[in-house]
Image (cartoon, rainbow, N blue to C red):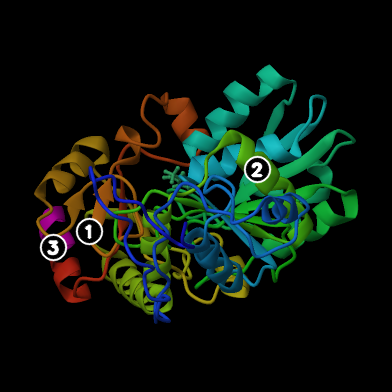
Amino acid sequence: MHKGFSTTLIRGGEPQADPPPPPAPLTTPIYETTAFVFDTADEIRQYNEGHGGRFLYSRYENPTVMAVEATLAVADSAEAGLVFSSGMAATSTVLFALLRAGDEVVCGAAVYGGTRSLLESFLPRFGVPARMASSEELAAPERLLGPKTKLLWFESPSNPTLRCVGVARIAQACRAAGVVSVIDNTFASPANQRPIILGVDLVMQSATKYLGGHSDITAGVVCGAKPIVHDVEMVRRVLGGVLDPQPAYALGRSLKTLEVRVARHNASGLAVARALEGHPAVARVYYPGLPSHPDHAIAKAQMSGFGGMVCIDLHGGEPAACRAFDQLQIVRRAPSLGGVESVCSLPILTSQWGYTDAQLASAGISRGMLRLSIGLEDAGDLIADIRQALE
Ligand SMILES: Cc1ncc(COP(=O)(O)O)c(C=O)c1O
């Protein structure tokens, strides 16, 4: 049989001739295959013994997937990266890889709801309790770390009020206490914030947002130093949450424009935030690039741009928020964020659905909030659209 030969099962068909050697492509091809062919038993032995450069099964490794992982590691200034079938697959794999029964997790209270529910509802079943910490408590992280704390998970900026915490301070306190620090950097993306440079051990991101950037890929990423990423990879093999080659290719393509897309998200986010601050219908604008944001100084010190997420709180509470939401024309009514098209969501109907007034108050969220993900449309058009919706 020929090397690289693909059999066509046609009755009476003759084997095809050897294809010519593949030309050198300018872009990374999509290796749409579940398994890889070996010529000899010795080659399989070499693979099993860990001699690099060979592939066995796409749940373990695939050239298209590895190409995007290498790009993501560079983007995050990390030694290694891994991609997953979603942000939650990345999160759950990290937690299952690094935690054992008897460990404890400290988690920023203002994290993504899925992460919170994994930590509060699932991990305790495996003997791993989680302790929630407010942004104020995360400002003095050493006080939060006890003898059983194995891992600290946090977000900055957080959803939807874009609260920021001192990333380097948390990383330093964790390192001193032998605790693994993990940041969910989804809202910032590496174009605006490089947590590895700030000393964090692992960076997780939902690539479904800015990294993918076109609202058409569901994926997750973890980046960090080689040994810890290796531990996570071994668990990914077993849990099976790897990304398929097709979306891995699409993600690689998206990353080529990450910097330019995020530069525009930043500029338009700031323009929208400034335009809405002082609007008579708006009680408050939450945007870390505005001096009025409670964490502006922290954001300025650790971010190179403030992103495309803007949250506004309306004077008229829930009825006013719903009315404005329904009136939007260019901005679409959809969950998620980080795409080229602007979208708006009502936190009380999405991430904070079912919260009591007391729970909303403790999360710093009001019933009159609109969360905007500012896309790449003309900023003037977006401002005009939001203004008309408010009036
Ligand atoms: C900040 C943050 N982290 C993690 C996730 C989970 O990512 P995914 O939906 O790709 O699983 C989300 C999803 O909205 C998110 O907003």
Q: Quadrant of residue 346?
A: top left
Q: Which residues are drawn in magenta? A: 386-391
Q: Quadrant of residue 66?
A: bottom right
* Three-letter code, disc 1: Pro
The magenta stretch spans residue 140: no
Q: Is tag 2's residue or tag 1's residue first in the polypeptide sequence?
A: 2
Q: Is tag 3's residue or tag 2's residue first in the polypeptide sequence?
A: 2
**Residue displayed at 83% across by 44% down:** 143
* Three-letter code, disc 3: Asp
Q: Is tag 1's residue or tag 3's residue first in the polypeptide sequence?
A: 1
For marks 1 and 3, give the CA distance. 16 Å
User: Is the C terminus in the top left, top right, bottom left or bottom right quadrant?
Assistant: bottom left
Secondary structure beneath dot 1 equals loop
Residue 47 percent across, percent down from the top left: 70, 54
Disc 2 + disc 1, Cβ < 8 Å: no
**Residue displayed at 70% across by 49% down:** 138
Residue 109 shown left or right of residue 189 in the figure: right
Residue for badge 3: 385
Tell us which disc is closer to us: 2 or 1.
2
